[in-house]
Amino acid sequence: MIGNIDKLNLVRLGAVMTYSTLQEIGAHIQASFDGIIADVQLGHHDAPIADSIDAFLLTNVLDIEIGGHTLGITDADLKSQDPEDFYNTIIGGKNPNNDVAVVSTRHLSPERIESDGDYHLLVDRTIKVSLHEIGHNLGLTDHATYRTAPDGALCPMSKGEFNKFGYQGYVRAVVDGRGVNFCDECGHFLRAMHRRQPSETSDSGLH
Ligand SMILES: [Zn+2]
Ligand SMILES: [Zn+2]
């Protein structure tokens, strides 16, 4: 399924964040997927102004209009038809039929953005959910348990349980608990599956 994954299209849908914030998110993504994602191309897509949008539909639109390995960030409420989802609205989702994932800031935002700290918290959460969804794009699966990375923070693929906390509680307990480094198991998978090979090794010799 995954085509050329070392380039990621990071696409802002509508006016959700400033361009420099998008740049900051892109830099964090590249750092967390060091050696795997070499290039983050920032883009903008004028999505129709909608309060909510079906996640599956949105990922299909992005696949047609942008294509390739893509992550869209929107402030619209993302709706999910998946009966597995605890709520019918999600903070992020990946389309299994292509290499496109989306993140919604709707439930990640503090109630009001009144200070730099509030905005920073929103950006921080958006980065962590972005890492989770890109992880899915690269073949990682959810950790039902709370698995920690070597730095002690939760692995970005930690999913935990929604119903235990409620939506806001979930974001605080699980998303805020995540770090930007993957656990040993995820790190091993990423390196084994996706580590870029130096181009000079592309000779035809048998090894
Ligand atoms: Zn997941
Ligand atoms: Zn992990």
Image (spheres, rainbow, N blue to C red):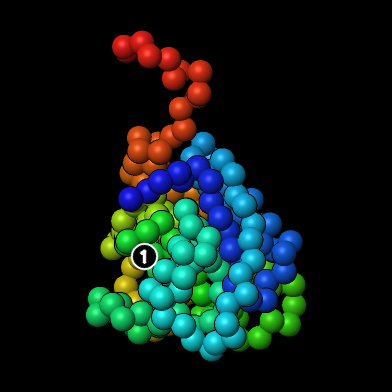
Residue at (51% x, 36% y) in the render:
35
Give how far across and how far down residue 32 sits, in percent. 53, 47
Q: Nearer the viewer, residue 61 or 150?
A: 61
Q: Quadrant of the C terminus?
A: top left
- On the picture, is 143 further left or further right than 134? left
Say above or below: 81 vs 130. below
Image quadrant assignment for residue 89: bottom left
Q: Is residue 112 visible?
A: yes
Give how far across and how far down residue 31 sits, in percent. 58, 45
Give how far across and how far down residue 125 sits, in percent. 55, 67
What is the three-letter code of the residue carrying label 1?
A: Asn
Q: Secondary structure at mark 1?
A: loop
Give how far across and how far down residue 121 sits, in percent. 62, 70
Farthest residue toward the front? 64
Say above or below: 81 vs 195. below
- Name the residue tied to disc 1: 95
Q: Is residue 173 visible?
A: no
Residue at (64% x, 57% y) in the render:
42
- On the picture, is 160 further left or further right than 33? left
Query: How many other residues sit within 10 Å of disc 1, few (<14), some (14-19) or many (≥20)?
Result: some
Say above or below: 187 vs 154. above
